[in-house]
């Protein structure tokens, strides 16, 4: 989120803390969600996951809920 907002010094600090704690993303562009008490991981634009349709339906519903609630990303609060 910091990088998206061009807040590179904050991005660097977070990545440094993550590295120090041994936290790593599996690969660039990867994400994960929890669904039915299971963690599902996927890569951006990859549709090979066996639950891909369900994942995109859930993401669409979440996006719609955020729009309905008039949510705006407030990067200043992170």
Image (cartoon, rainbow, N blue to C red):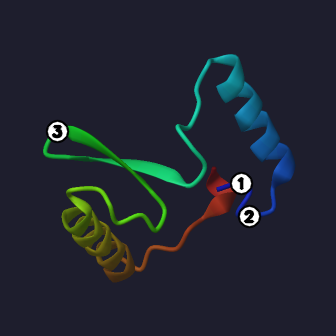
Question: For the point 41% across and 80% down, which residue is it?
Answer: 70
Of tags 3 and 1, the one toward the viewer is: 3
Above or below: residue 30 compared with residue 47: above
Residue closer to the observer: 76 or 11:
11
Q: Residues within 10 Å of mark 3 (few under 14, many from 20)?
A: few
Mark 2 to mark 1 CA distance (whole Å): 5 Å
On the image, which quarter does residue 18 sit in?
A: top right
Mark 2 to mark 3 CA distance (whole Å): 32 Å
Sequence-wise first label, 3 or 1? 1
The numbered mark at residue 5 is 2
Which x, y percent locates residue 46? 42, 64
Which x, y percent locates residue 15? 72, 35
Question: For the point 52% across and 74% down, which residue is it?
Answer: 72
Which x, y percent locates residue 6? 81, 62
Mark 3 to mark 1 CA distance (whole Å): 29 Å
Outermost residue, front direction? 48
The N terminus is located in which quarter?
bottom right
Which residue is labeled 1 in the image? 2
The numbered mark at residue 37 is 3
Side of 8 relative to 20 (left or right): right
Contact, mark 3 vs mark 1 (Cβ under 8 Å) = no
Side of 61 relative to 36 (left or right): right
Q: Residues within 10 Å of mark 1 (few under 14, many from 20)?
A: some
């Amino acid at each position: 989120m910091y990088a998206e907002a061009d807040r590179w010094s904050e991005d660097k600090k977070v990545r440094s803390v993550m590295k120090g704690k041994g936290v790593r993303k599996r690969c660039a562009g990867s994400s994960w969600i929890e669904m039915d008490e299971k963690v599902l991981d996927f890569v951006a634009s990859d549709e090979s996951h066996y639950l891909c349709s369900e994942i995109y339906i859930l993401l669409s519903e979440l996006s719609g809920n955020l729009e309905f609630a008039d949510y705006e990303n407030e990067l200043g609060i992170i």
